[in-house]
Image (tube, rainbow, N blue to C red):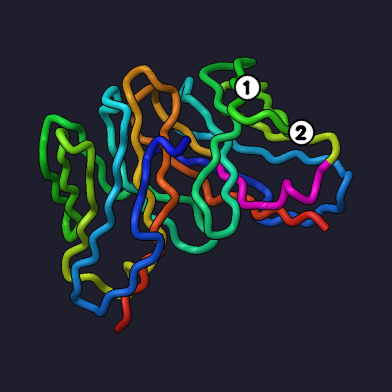
Amino acid sequence: QQQVKQSPQSLIVQKGGIPIINCAYENTAFDYFPWYQQFPGKGPALLIAIRPDVSEKKEGRFTISFNKSAKQFSLHIMDSQPGDSATYFCAASGTGANNLFFGTGTRLTVIP
Amino acid sequence: SQTIHQWPATLVQPVGSPLSLECTVEGTSNPNLYWYRQAAGRGLQLLFYSVGIGQISSEVPQNLSASRPQDRQFILSSKKLLLSDSGFYLCAWTRGIGQPQHFGDGTRLSIL
């Protein structure tokens, strides 16, 4: 059973656009929600993370929106650039868990 | 600062041959360590994790095994590789439960 559901599977936007990637979870014990960025041939790199005590977190052009009641969270990339083209993974874990549960990934392509 | 190393970066092995992939972490002590497999265009599948020397938890039964002979060393092994073992193997570490996971750059394993 997929603990974290991620959509869309792929996304193509023009440079300057705002891609949005969505994730949903069921386990209310989850309290840590990171996003990872992965370039081809490389390991995922932590991009930004949020805990459920806040509804939004910004770091540079990347923003996480978190809706605790809906058990959903999303990643927005402002003023997207071709260099943002990568695969993005959302994940979730709880304080009692020894591992992260990952979404299936979104391949983002930003067209110049 | 902390760094994580995986080697080799790429490996081509015949079916039925043994496997040993190594991961080491520098700059921290007593990390939690993880092995993941990522099939092409897919998400991350947790294989093993370890919270201490000699302590291994398996998430997916298969012909792979893991060992942690030293605090910052994690090894993924197989006695006889199968075609289905092909994939991108990633090692990760974290300070503890609910903390960010940091990934190495992976090993691309191809089975012929």
Please state if A16 lies on the left or on the right of B72 as rendered. left
Q: Position of residue A11 (x, y in %)?
A: 34, 68
Q: Is label 1 in a helix, a strand or a loop? A: strand
Amino acid carrying label 1: it is Gln
Please state if B92 lies on the left or on the right of A82 as rendered. right
Q: Position of residue B100 (x, y in %)?
A: 35, 35
Q: Of marks 1 and 2, which one's residue comes earlier in the chain? A: 2
Q: Position of residue B88 (x, y in %)?
A: 61, 51
Q: Quadrant of residue B79?
A: top right
Amino acid carrying label 2: it is Asn
Which chain letter goes with mark 2?
A: B
In which quadrant of the rendered image does the C terminus of chain A lie?
Answer: bottom left
Residue in view at x 71 percent, y 52 percent: B86
> Which residue is more in the foreground, A87 or A25?
A25
How far apart, in angstroms, are the residues tagged by discs 1 and 2? 23 Å
> Which residue is more in the foreground, B108 or A89?
A89
Which chain letter goes with mark 1?
A: B
The numbered disc on residue B70 is 1
Residue labelled with disc 2: B63
Characterize the local packing of mark 1: few (<14), some (14-19) or many (20 or more) Cα atoms within 10 angstroms.
few
Q: Quadrant of residue B58?
A: top right
Q: Which residues are magenta?
A: B81-90
Characterize the local packing of mark 2: few (<14), some (14-19) or many (20 or more) Cα atoms within 10 angstroms.
few
